[in-house]
Amino acid sequence: MPKNTMQVIRVHDYGGPEKLVLEQAPVPQVPSDQVLIHLKAAGVNPVDWKFRSGSAKQFMPLTFPWTPGLEGAGIVEVAGADVKAFKKGDEVYGLVSGAYAEYALAKTNEIFPKPAGLTFEEAAAIPIGALTAWGAVIDTAKVEAGQHVLVHGAAGGVGLYAVQLARWKGAHVTGTTSASNLEFVRSLGAEQVIDYQAARFETVLHAMDVVIDMVGGDLPERSWQVLRPGGVYVTVAGRLAADAGKAQNVKALSAGRAPVENLKRISELIEARQLKVVVGKVFPLAEAAQAHELSQTGHGRGRIILRMGD
Ligand SMILES: NC(=O)c1ccc[n+]([C@@H]2O[C@H](COP(=O)([O-])OP(=O)(O)OC[C@H]3O[C@@H](n4cnc5c(N)ncnc54)[C@H](OP(=O)(O)O)[C@@H]3O)[C@@H](O)[C@H]2O)c1
């Protein structure tokens, strides 16, 4: 049986990283159709600090106390009475709400067996990044073999999967990143990598078929200049006006996370070594505030991870 109480990060009010407080709280009761996971690792996503700060409260108001975290990996501690698919001791990963904690509940259709050979930290680095990249590259842009695809933010927690999925589809991939990540992005399969601090990509590229944007800011308008007529621009990093791209004769689309069942296919690609998982900096759970500070810089490589104590 799990302990009665657990260590958990809780937020009691909107604000800065200092609002992330390590507390003792009761371990959740397990509904009959869910599982309780003893978490070993959780992913830290930009949306976690957007929720925490209050900048997203218009469309996603929080109820306090609130525990951040959308993804994690660990061991099933208790399977609810009606659960057939999982049992105590199974190693799992997936979408886990409130994952900055030693224990959290998960729906059985949102978790999957941990891919063979992966650590818990690696498994926790998959769900949001890979599903979002799948939503952008496969479901929305519908990238095809032979296409020329530009990926902005190619070294980040989403971008690293976008590069690899476009390559997996047989596209020629160009990535943008800072100088420190040029070799890393090449190692993901990008044929061409542009240091965004050294060159403006629109002076180097033209007639691209697809742009996948993980950065936003002024990149939509600049990206439309490098697309061929009828080319496709997909963003996961902002909202687009209804007429976005029309004057430039490009298709401009927003993408969200692909449905969670795609994690099954993603697990298979990882086990077949067709998709690499990349863990960024790892922090202990107690240092969630430092993890948010790093994520808020908007720079880095791979998914930042929180590790729970043993
Ligand atoms: N719509 C959705 O469902 C959804 C889901 C997940 C994420 N998102 C959004 O997608 C964005 C990326 O998320 P993430 O998890 O990948 O973030 P991340 O892990 O923090 O990565 C951000 C990356 O952007 C790069 N970067 C920063 N400025 C750049 C520029 N001007 N040009 C090219 N690259 C630049 C950084 O690379 P350097 O260190 O080399 O600068 C860094 O690797 C966030 O805005 C997030 O909120 C949306």
Image: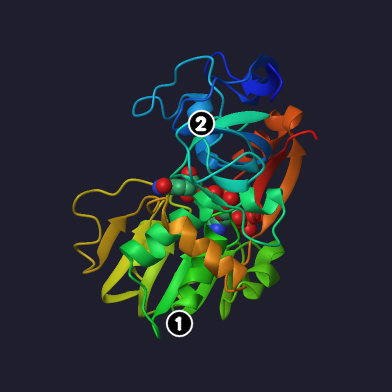
Q: Do callouts 2 and 1 mark residues in contact (Cβ within 8 Å)?
A: no
Question: Which amino acid type corresponds to the residue marked 2 in the rendered image?
Answer: Gly
Q: Which residue is mark 2?
A: 80
Q: Is residue 264 above or below residue 99?
A: below
Q: Which residue is mark 1?
A: 170
Depth order, front residue of 300/90: 90
- Residue 226 percent across, percent down from the top left: 37, 73
Q: Nearer the viewer, residue 41 or 143?
A: 41
User: Which residue is at a point 38% across and 55% down the rendered structure image?
Assistant: 235
Which of the image's four quarters has the C terminus? top right
| Residue at x 32% of width, y 46% of height | 239
Residue 142 as seen in the image, left or right of residue 269? left
The x and y percentages for residue 244 are 24, 55
With respect to residue 258, does 45 lie above or below? above
- Where residue 63 appears, x then y in whole percent? 45, 17
Colouring chosen for the image of the structure: rainbow
The image quadrant that residue 211 belongs to is bottom left
Residue 286: percent from left, percent from top: 75, 27
How many C-alpha atoms fall within 10 Å of the one at disc 2: few (<14), some, or many (≥20)? some
Counting residues from the start of the chain, the first of labels 2 and 1 encountered is 2
Mark 2 to mark 1 CA distance (whole Å): 43 Å
Q: Secondary structure at mark 1?
A: loop
Residue at the far right: name it.
310
Nearest the viewer among 268 and 30 is 30
Q: Residue at x 29, y 49 (%)?
A: 240
Q: Secondary structure at mark 2?
A: loop
